[in-house]
Image (cartoon, rainbow, N blue to C red):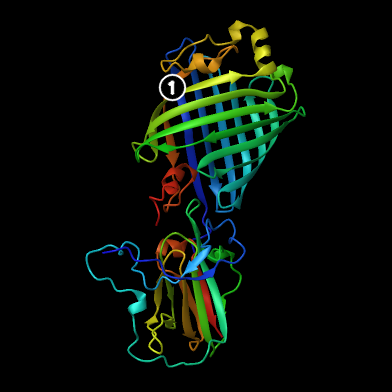
């Protein structure tokens, strides 16, 4: 099987490097939903990609998102630190705020060199993978290195919800945020 | 959450006994820290001396260490020299970290209680011949802003040391090694040592690798010593890695 071509460049990293808790940045951010996951590019069988997922039911909330929240997946292998936007959980003062009832676009950018499965509790995320009205619903999205993914969320579950990397030692060391719907 | 835990790290980087020469050198070099990701208490100790005699040099440093960038720490604190006589206390500021291309660097400036400013630069590199067999070149340069006659130091660069050690990691925490090192005095420091008399200088010795002739040049030659020793690291719990494990991360094999 031939190597899968890298997905298209969809953005470039803004200024800033997220501080000492982060070693590198994805200067070029790509849509990699059409690529197999790490280690699955040259296997002898068919591999399902995120781009091929299609929701059975159409998306219910058709509103345009009222706000975009962008979070970067960051880490420092040298010091073994993990975080969002270079800030460990203990360094963050306030939760990520989703106003109740709003339609949110959550953008995740992976600035590290490995995949991170990012899990939002409480609400499904609809992955913007080009499937029109049939976006797949995910509670965990595995974000590839230097990938930029976009997810739609209807903030209809009030309360405080865990949002974290599901590699639990990353979560434990700070790759964790509280999402507050209020 | 566990992202603010206190970790500790101990690296006995060199613990060695020379062999093959007339006046062989014993040396130690250890450092460690206790703290979190951003703030640490860091200590260092090193020294050396001729076997069977009390150490010629022995120092200990106690430093506050602050993470200032992904690969660098700023350090400030105190250093105390137990040897040589007369004893000295110093204020210390420096940086320690990993330079591009994975050179481990420790650079410090010292201001003694006599008002003397001195400087030290140490650079190490780790070449992984295999995952366990590691060749480590090491260079150290010492300099002074002024002459310090009572310590036998001239101004400018006064001592340099080159070392090459080959270690085998039986475990991550324990690595015997063998190596060679070569120390050289420069300028007025060398002249003062020569004037102080031969009894202060170890006899010239050519080590089996034949480096001393080529490198020692015309200066009073210090022994080029073959050293056999061990290198020990103590890792922090929970898989949190200390600085002694950099080579694994550098090659990306420990990514997880």
Q: Quadrant of residue A50?
A: bottom left
The reply to whether residue B4 is in sight is yes
B139 left or right, relative to B119: left
Q: Quick one: which residue is furthest to the right in this view?
A: B115
Question: In the depicted view, which residue is nearer to us: A14 or B202?
Answer: A14
Q: Is residue A57 above or below residue B130?
A: below
Q: Position of residue B186 (x, y in %)?
A: 64, 19
Q: Which residue is mark 1?
A: B227
Residue lying furthest left: A44
**Label total for image:** 1
Q: Residue at x 56, y 86 (%)?
A: A182
**Parent chain of label 1:** B
For the residue carrying disc 1, how many other residues have a C-alpha within 10 Å: few (<14), some (14-19), or many (20+)?
A: many
Q: Is residue B89 above or below residue B35?
A: above
Which quadrant of the view contains residue B44?
Answer: top right
Point out the image quarter for the C terminus of chain B: bottom left
Horizontally, is B115 left or right of A44 in the view?
A: right
Residue B170, position in %: x, y? 33, 36
In percent of width and height, residue A140 lies at: 39, 75
> Element at badge 1?
strand
Residue B88 image position (x, y, % from top left): 69, 26
Q: Is residue B115 above or below residue B210?
A: below
Of B100 and A125, nearer the camera is B100
Please name whichever residue, A25 or B72, is drawn nearer the observer in this view of the structure: A25
Left or right, residue A165 beside residue A1: right
Whether residue B51 is visible: no
Q: Residue furthest top?
A: B198
Q: Image point 70% across, 16% down: which residue?
A: B188
Q: Residue at x 39, y 51 (%)?
A: B254
């Amino acid at each position: 099987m031939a190597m899968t071509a890298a997905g298209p460049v969809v953005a470039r990293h803004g200024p800033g490097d997220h501080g000492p808790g982060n070693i590198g940045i994805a200067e070029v951010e790509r849509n990699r939903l059409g690529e197999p996951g790490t280690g699955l590019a040259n296997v002898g069988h068919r591999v399902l990609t995120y781009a091929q997922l299609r929701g059975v039911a159409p998306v219910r909330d058709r509103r345009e998102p009222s706000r975009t929240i962008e979070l970067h997946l960051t880490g420092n292998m040298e010091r073994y630190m993990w975080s969002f936007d270079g800030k460990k959980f203990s360094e963050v003062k306030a939760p990520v705020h989703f106003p109740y009832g709003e339609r949110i676009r959550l953008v995740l950018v992976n600035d590290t060199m490995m995949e991170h499965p990012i899990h939002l509790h409480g609400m499904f995320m609809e992955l913007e993978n080009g499937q029109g009205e049939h976006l797949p619903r995910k509670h965990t999205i595995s974000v590839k290195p230097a990938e930029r993914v976009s997810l739609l969320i209807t903030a209809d579950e009030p309360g405080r919800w865990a949002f974290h990397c599901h590699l639990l030692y990353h979560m434990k060391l700070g790759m964790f945020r509280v999402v507050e719907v209020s | 959450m566990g992202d603010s835990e206190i970790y500790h790290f101990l690296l006995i980087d060199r613990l060695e006994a020379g062999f093959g020469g007339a006046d062989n050198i014993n040396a130690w070099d250890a450092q460690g820290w206790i703290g979190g990701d951003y703030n640490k208490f860091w200590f260092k100790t090193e020294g050396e001396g001729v076997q069977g005699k009390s150490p010629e040099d022995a120092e200990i440093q106690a430093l506050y260490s602050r993470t200032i960038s992904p690969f660098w720490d700023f350090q400030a604190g105190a250093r105390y020299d137990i040897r040589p006589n007369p004893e000295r206390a110093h204020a210390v500021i420096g940086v320690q970290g990993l330079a591009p291309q994975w050179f481990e660097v420790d650079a410090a400036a010292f201001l003694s209680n006599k008002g003397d400013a001195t400087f030290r630069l140490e650079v190490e590199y780790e070449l992984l011949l295999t995952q366990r067999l590691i060749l480590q070149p090491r260079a150290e340069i010492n300099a002074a802003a002024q002459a310090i006659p009572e310590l036998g130091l001239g101004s400018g660069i006064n001592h340099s040391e080159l070392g090459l050690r080959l270690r085998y990691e039986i475990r991550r925490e324990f690595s015997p090694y063998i190596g060679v090192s070569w120390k050289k005095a420069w300028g007025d420091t060398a002249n003062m040592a020569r004037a102080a008399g031969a009894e202060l200088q170890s006899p010239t010795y050519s080590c089996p690798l034949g480096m001393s002739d080529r490198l020692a040049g015309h200066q009073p030659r210090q022994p080029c010593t073959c050293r056999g020793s061990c290198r020990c690291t103590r890792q922090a719990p929970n898989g949190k890695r200390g600085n002694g494990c950099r080579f694994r991360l550098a090659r990306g094999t420990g990514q997880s």
